[in-house]
Image: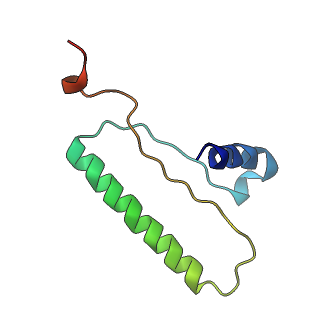
Amino acid sequence: MRAKSRLGTKAIERFPKDERDISEVYVPLSRENFEKVREDIAWLRRKILKLSEEDRNATRVYQCNVLVFPLTRSPSEEVK
């Protein structure tokens, strides 16, 4: 996974902005909504794969990373 992340960092230098899309958001989520986000990511991954399978004019290989992970602990996990 770290090697893949490095590819993304290098892409910033190798390719102009109109040839890549790199974005991020920081959001507070409940466990319930985190699970919904995971479902949405799975749906997006399937959609991208379907587009790729149907694309008869593909000229490049793209890497698509979507990461979602906690930056903080929940209050119930805090050390007392």
Q: Is residue 7 left or right of residue 43?
A: right
Tell me the quarter of the picture where residue 2 sits: top right
Residue 73 x/y as whole percent = 31, 27
Q: Is residue 46 above or below residue 20?
A: below
- The residue positioned 75% from the left and 76% from the top of the image is 59
Question: What residue is at 60 percent from the left and 49 percent from the top?
Answer: 22
Colouring chosen for the image of the structure: rainbow
Number of marks in the rendered image: 0
Residue 4 located left or right of residue 75: right
- Classify residue 66 as left or right of residue 15: left
Q: Residue at x 52, y 74 (%)?
A: 49
| Residue 69 picture location, percent across and down | 41, 40
Left or right position of 32 against 13: left
Viewer-proximal residue among 25 and 80:
80
Q: Position of residue 60 (x, y in %)?
A: 74, 71
The quadrant the C terminus occupies is: top left
Residue situated furthest top in the rendering = 80
- Which residue occupies the extreme right position in the image? 14
Q: Residue at x 66, y 64 (%)?
A: 62
Query: Is 55 rendered above or below residue 47?
Result: below
Position of 11 relative to 28 (above/below): below
Q: Is residue 48 above or below residue 28?
A: below
Q: Position of residue 79 (x, y in %)?
A: 24, 15
